[in-house]
Amino acid sequence: MEEWYRVHLSGFYDWSERLHADKWLLFEQNIGPYLSIDETALSEDELYTIVTNKAAKGKKGAIVAIVRGTKAEDVIAVLLKIKERFRRKVKEVTLDMAANMTSVRPKRRSL
């Protein structure tokens, strides 16, 4: 029954995110004006960078992105997949003191 669910009923093999889900997940609909970026260790060897919408206060709709690892370049590459109209909503990004994340901040456009 478990195998039947996994292979046929769950829809896992048809999931559009399946090919990259072990590297990153993106929920652009959850973006808001105030974001937070932090790293977390899910296990001893698994570090992830998590981008959250602060307005959701950890509840439904809080996660904007989960990126495997802590390299700023990897996080930037995933965040650039968010449509520009959503990215323009961001006013403030709060991050911890990790020096590698300072380059993730949004670029201000000149008027």
Image: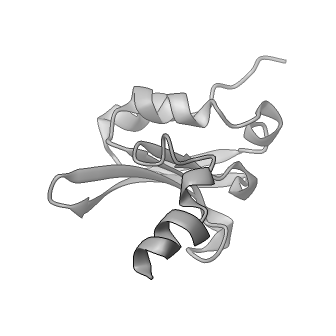
Q: In terms of depth relative to the viewer, which is nearer, 13 or 49?
A: 13
The quadrant of the rendering that contains the C terminus is top right
**Considering only vertical position in the picture, is 47 above or below 54?**
above
Q: Quadrant of residue 59?
A: bottom right
Please identify the residue farthest to the top as the structure is shown. 110
Q: In terms of depth relative to the viewer, which is nearer, 92 or 88?
A: 88
Q: How is the image coloured?
A: one colour
Please identify the residue farthest to the left as the structure is shown. 44
Q: Is residue 72 left or right of residue 36?
A: left
Residue 12 image offset from top left, x and y in percent:
55, 59
**Considering only vertical position in the picture, is 44 above or below 92?**
below
Residue 35 image offset from top left, x and y in percent:
60, 53
The residue at 70%/53% (across/down) is 31
The residue at 47%/44% (across/down) is 24
The residue at 73%/38% (across/down) is 87
The residue at 61%/62% (across/down) is 11
Residue 16 image offset from top left, x and y in percent:
63, 46
The quadrant of the rendering that contains the N terminus is bottom left
**Considering only vertical position in the picture, is 28 above or below 106?**
below
Q: In terms of depth relative to the viewer, which is nearer, 44 or 21?
A: 21
Q: Is residue 88 left or right of residue 37?
A: right
Residue 96 image offset from top left, x and y in percent:
38, 51
